[in-house]
Amino acid sequence: MTRTWVPPAIPTVASLLLAALWGLSVFDGWGMDAFCSNADSYVACADRIATATLLSAAIALVAATSTAAAWITRRAALLGVGVGAWVLAVGVLFVGGVVA
């Protein structure tokens, strides 16, 4: 079995980009514009997206914590956990927006 070493900068950059996408979708209103612009009831759509945002925020907290812990403790395995959690947080936000 051959192990390939990945420089820690690659998953760190991926985490930062996914965090930026998630943050802009939640805090800048990209999610609302994308999923509620054509809705009959904008307020009802916003309430449904808020539920998905809350669940996604819990996952994003895990992602940010594991990414920071990876750099503090110098454990590269946590960087993979952080990237995976960011992908899950963005995915939950997207699926929640589609459902809303």
Image: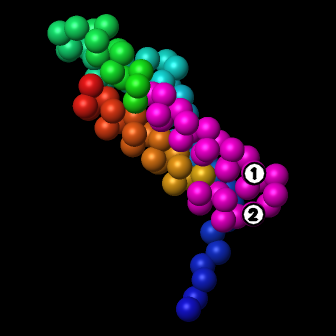
Q: Is residue 57 magenta?
A: yes
Observer-nearest of 92 and 5? 92
Q: CA distance from mark 1 to mark 2?
A: 8 Å
- The residue lying furthest to the left in this view is 40
Residue drawn at (53%, 32%) of the image: 57
Task: Residue type at mark 2: give it.
Answer: Arg
- Using residue 72 as the reference point, say whether residue 70 is left or right of it: left
- Expressed as whole percent of the image width and height from the top left, the position of residue 68 reads 73, 47
Q: Secondary structure at mark 1?
A: helix
Disc on res. 69: 1
Q: Overall secondary structure of the magenta stretch? A: helix
Q: Is residue 33 in view from this perspective?
A: no
Residue at horizontal 20%, vertical 14%? Answer: 38
Q: Which residues are magenta?
A: 53-81
* Colour scheme of the rendered structure: rainbow
Q: Quadrant of the C terminus?
A: top left
Q: On the rendered structure, is 28 left or right of 67?
A: left
Q: Quadrant of residue 93?
A: top left
Expressed as whole percent of the image width and height from the top left, the position of residue 96 reads 33, 33
Residue 73 picture quarter:
bottom right
Q: Which residue sits furthest bottom?
A: 1
Report the number of discs.
2
Which numbered circle lies on residue 75?
2
User: Percent x, y for residue 44?
Assistant: 28, 12
Mark 1 is on which residue type?
Answer: Ala
Q: Residues within 10 Å of mark 2 (few under 14, many from 20)?
A: some
Q: Are marks 1 and 2 in contact (CB under 8 Å)?
A: yes
Q: Residue at x 61, y 44 (%)?
A: 62
